[in-house]
Image (spheres, rainbow, N blue to C red):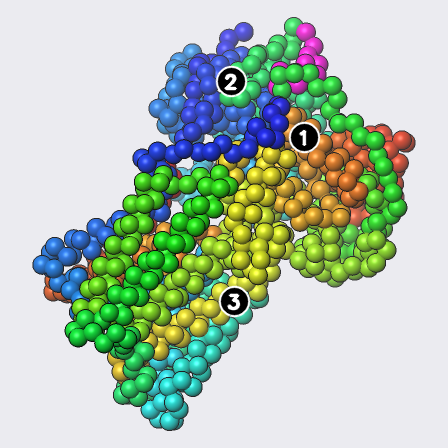
Amino acid sequence: MNAILEMRGITKTFPGVKALDNVNITVKAGEIHALVGENGAGKSTLMKVLSGVYPHGSYSGEIVYEGQERRFSGIADSEKLGIIIIHQELALVPLLSIAENIFLGNEQAQFGVIDWSVAFAKTKDLLKLVGLKESPDELITNLGVGKQQLVEIAKALSKKVKLLILDEPTASLNEKDSDALLNLLLRFKEQGISSILISHKLNEISKVADSITVLRDGGTVETLDCRAESISEDRIIRGMVGRTMEDRYPKREPKIGETIFQVENWSAYHPLHSHMQVVKNVNLNIRRGEIVGIAGLMGAGRTEFAMSLFGRSYGQNISGRVSLHGKEIDVSTVEKAVSNGIAYATEDRKTYGLVLAEDIRKNVTLAHLEGVSKNLVIDDIQELAVANDYRSKMRIRCSNVFQEAVNLSGGNQQKVVLSKWLFSDPEILILDEPTRGIDVGAKYEIYTIINRLADAGKGVLMISSEMPELLGMCDRIYVMNEGSLIAELDIAEASQEKIMHAIVKSGRR
Amino acid sequence: MDTRTADEIQVPQQKTSWMEFVKTHFRDYGMLLSLLVIMLFFQVVTDGTLLRPLNLTNLVLQNSYIVIMALGMLLVIVAGHIDLSVGSIVGFVGGLAAMMMVRWGFDPVTTTIACLIVGGMIGAAQGYWVAYFKVPSFIVTLAGMLVFKGLTLALLGGMSVGPFPVGFQRLSSGFIPDMFGGEGFNYTALFLGVASVAAIIYFSFRSRANQLKHAVETAPFGLFLFKNALLAVLVVAFCYLMATYRGLPNVLVIMAVLIALYAFVTNRTTIGRRIYALGGNEKAAKLSGIKTERLTFLTFVNMGVLAGLAGLIFAARLNTATPKAGLGFELDVIAAVFIGGASATGGVGKVTGAVIGAFVMGVMNNGMSILGIGIDYQQVIKGLVLLAAVSLDVYNRKK
């Protein structure tokens, strides 16, 4: 089979960092090529080189595409040749319709006048291809993340794509949507479209990939051919981290004590539509040293529940009782919730978790400035000591704590968010998708941190869309669907089937 | 995976070379350098008029109110907002002061206190809409600009009101008297200059020692010495020049104290830190327990008080309140903050930058006036300098 793309000896340096060091990758025509590696291994950088975000001349090495050496000076050049990249952060305009987004920059127009009937007809065809049943004039903002992802793919298809690059496409999708997306990739393959799939979800990769290139620390480690022999997840992980990983979840002997945290009859309504009850009479408790999970599909109301609990950061008409150590506590503002020992690490670290333009040090102390100041004056030496302490405890990989958060990889950003909340010294830590978009090695580190917290006698509430993660980490799992807790499973009896069963059963009622 | 132990990951003691340090900190020093270059340029083309003691005094008096307002505007802009109403507040508060003292017979002290409170209340009224009603600050303060421009006219009945009691005039035209009784030379000015240099050097050595002790990256010692020596020479030379004229203007002392206070608040206090976080990412700040609404409100109150102070100083300087006072000041103040490196999207900006920015504008105004360039082309040049300074900054940041 011919190679559609060959990247040879790609080296890209940023001031002070060698992001890519002599990377080689060959994608054959009509295959699904997975690109894996830990955070910061250089996957996204490599794809930016390929798509022209980093123009020719800013890197060394050569790109051969369809048999010719190419020198892209911008995204437009690579798109013209059918290389389309779909980024982790979706690039859709929320208040425009699906049709408008799909043809943005590529309008179906004559002399600058858009022919909407053509655009709509074409959009309908494209949506059918990707399996979306929405109307072309639906606004993007009304779609869930999974559907938005499909719109992005439809947009790529509208541009006569030959090589589709997907950066973590399923990171924020539930399993059903992920499956649909992967099947779509397989269909594209039959039509001769090649794809490069960047993902941390190894089960998906072993399901669809024809070959796998493993990057580590900016260099190519190996290319695995999945057609010759089946490649196990453990085999891939070994390549990524450079060693075998005995267990994906660190072992822990739970030492569970008395109930320390209780939520009773918690309800919240949608912030705009006051009749829509998003969280319905939730009752839950957490015991000392316990890790409690909340499972559920995307949109089940888990994040909404957590945020409404944490200083009423979501919703309106919130009611219910929260108590810690048997005493009712006031969580009506974030400040009160924090000072009463609650912390909430968000699922969306870039929007809600970090001040990206500020350095690690300032982000770590932000939620608990009192801890490094006296009479409102910050002791910068003490602050630095705190930041360096968390840097080493959490193994935040950075050149120093004065590095801006925006320049960190996803896993390290997450560690900064966790550091911030650990520094506020909470009794109850609510973790919302703590390992989303994070590589296997960093996940393990974060699991270890979570276990350490539980062992220190804190209560942990963990929201996750990855069921194996909940099953591997938690002592008890609540299942949420449509705003209500519908099941409570002890870890001994819990399984993926039981969780899905509970969800399906409650949906049918 | 990283298997090093915690000790090994500790920050290594960093040895930075001069060139490297200057390169990485170019943005910090670049503005100061441009100001010095601009001053040198005008010093040469005006045949040394710029730095004559009389002109230097004028330069300070002419720009004091812009600098003072730039301090407040910096916080507003860092918090992610803008305040277009400050020029009108200057006019209104100046007018109020005139009416209180000249027409209604209040004494200067009562008037000053009342006017500062009124300034704060105006800031509060605008901040309320911005912070709690989420009306864009551009619109709220545009409305405020019109409202207070109109109220100034109404208050003064379209006329100029003055002159003021001598005590009040001193606010702008007074000088720190000489305690040592020098003839034609104000020893107090020189003494204050030397004393502040000593204080600055003491504090910078102390903080450097502290940084070294905790293995923080520091400037190379040579550069550190050079920087302090340069600063010392500049301050002492400036005070010497002032001493040969009439000494230090009262306004200069007020301004210097305020600059030091605001530099401290933004760098070292929790409220300063929180304003930067608010401007950098309001959602994340809110979810970190910061009362973002109240903080936004307070930055506007603060701006109002400083605009009120500027109004008093400006009125005292003219010795009369006119309906046109303060016209267009907001543009100079905002330009100063942006020239000083603040970001229009919030979260970025420094007090020192804003002050230097204000003096860049001030020196250009002054220098061009000495050269006899008309107000028409002065504006053109100032506009282009603003554009150039900010584009250079944007370009530097991209690199």
- Tell me if A396 is positioned left or right of A263 in this view: left
The residue shown at (28%, 50%) is B229
> What residue sits right under mark 3 in the picture?
B298
Number of other residues with Cα within 10 Å of mark 3, as a class: few under 14, some 14 to 19, many 20 or more: many
x and y, in percent, of residue B253 in the image: 33, 69
Relative to the observer, which residue lies in front, A74 or A419?
A: A419
The residue shown at (43%, 77%) is B116
Q: Chain of mark 2?
A: A
Which region is colored magenta?
Answer: A229-240
- Tell me if B318 is positioned left or right of B95 in this view: left
The residue shown at (35%, 93%) is B103
- Residue A59 visible in the current orientation: yes
x and y, in percent, of residue A478 in the image: 83, 41
The residue shown at (16%, 57%) is B42
Residue type at numbered disc 3: Leu
Q: Say above or below: A87 vs A460.
A: above
Q: Chain of mark 3?
A: B
Same-subunit check for callouts 3 and 2: no
Residue type at numbered disc 2: Gly
Q: Say above or below: A204 vs A171.
A: above
> What residue sits right under mark 1 in the picture?
A445
In the current view of this chain or complex, which residue is farthest to the right? A493
> Mark 2 and mark 1: span between their CA atoms?
22 Å
Q: Are marks 2 and 1 in contact (CB under 8 Å)?
A: no
Q: Say above or below: B5 vs A233.
A: below
Residue type at numbered disc 1: Glu
> Mark 1 and mark 3: span between their CA atoms?
41 Å
Mark identifier at residue A219: 2
In the current view of this chain or complex, which residue is farthest to the left? B47
x and y, in percent, of residue B172 in the image: 29, 76
- Residue A157 visible in the current orientation: no
For residue A232: magenta?
yes
